[in-house]
Image (cartoon, rainbow, N blue to C red):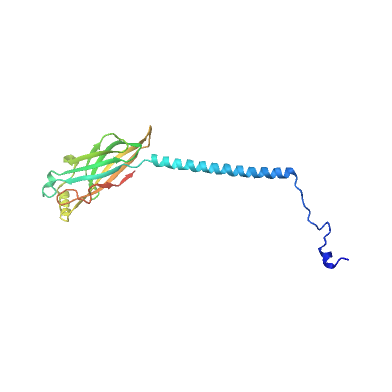
Amino acid sequence: MNTPTQLAETKTPEQRPIKRHHTPRYYAQRVKDSLTTRVSKLICAVFLGLLFIVGIITFILWLSLRPHRPRFFIHHFSILGLGLDNGYKNPEIVFNVTARNSNLNIGIYYDSMVGSVYYKNQKIGSTPLLDEYYEGPKTTKVLTAALSGETLNVDRHRWMEFSQERSKGAVGFRLEISSTIRFRISAWDSKRHGMHANCDVSVGRDGLILPSSKDVRCPVYFS
C-alpha cells in the first residue's frame, strides 16, 4: 500500500512533462537563420568600415584642397621728413610688404592690387601695386611702393597732427592691401573674392617703423 508521500510523488501521464522532438526541417531553419544573421552582421560591418575609410579619405582631400588665404607681412614702413616742420611740402611714405601663398597645390590669381595708407581711419594716400598677377603655390611676392605728390594727400594741418602724435613717441598708420582674387585648383577656378589685408603700423620719432610693427602678419578678410 502506497504511503501519502509516495502518492504525492506519483504523477499521472498527463502531469509528466512532454519531451518534444523537433523535425530536421526545424533544425535546418535554425541553421539558416543563424547564417543569415551572421551574413547580415558581416555585410553591415564591411559597409561601415568602407564608409569610415571613405570619410577619412574625403577629410584628407578636403584638408589638402581647402584654399588658405594669402598671408601678408609688413617689413618696412617710413615717412620721410617727419621731424621737419615743413615736411608737408614734400611728404613721402615708403613701404615694403610680402604676399605669401602658403597653399601646397593651389595658385592665386590677383585681378589687380592697390595699397592705401590711412591715418585715424581717413585715407591719405593710395597707389597701384600690381596689375593682373598669378602667384603659384608656396611662393612669395615682394610689394614695394612709395606714395608722394598726387598719390599722397597730406596738408599742413595733417602734418601738425603727425607732429603732435610724434611728440608722444609714435605715430600710428594703417596700410591696407586690397584686391580681387580667385583660387586655381588644377584646371578649376573658384569664384572671385574681394580681399583686404589690414596692417597696423607705428613709426617712431625718426619716421621709421617701430620694432613692434616690423615683420608682423597682417589680418586678411574677404568681402
Q: Quadrant of the N terminus?
A: bottom right
Q: Position of residue 167 (x, y in %)?
A: 15, 55
Q: Name the residue: 22% across, 45% down.
A: 75
- Residue 38: quadrant of the picture: top right
Residue sticking out furthest to the top? 187
Q: Nearer the viewer, residue 203 or 29?
A: 29
Q: Name the residue: 46% across, 43% down.
A: 56
Q: Position of residue 203 (x, y in %)?
A: 19, 50
Residue 8 vertical placement versus 196 (above, below): below
Residue sticking out furthest to the bottom? 4
Question: In screen coordinates, is 169 left or right of 9?
Answer: left
Q: Quadrant of the C terminus?
A: top left
Q: Position of residue 189 (x, y in %)?
A: 37, 34
Q: Nearer the viewer, residue 148 or 31?
A: 31
Residue sticking out furthest to the front? 1
- Residue 124: quadrant of the picture: top left
Question: In screen coordinates, is 9 left or right of 98?
Answer: right
Q: Position of residue 174 (x, y in %)?
A: 24, 48
Q: Nearer the viewer, residue 140 or 178?
A: 140
Q: Name the residue: 84% across, 67% down.
A: 4
Question: In screen coordinates, is 26 left or right of 218?
Answer: right
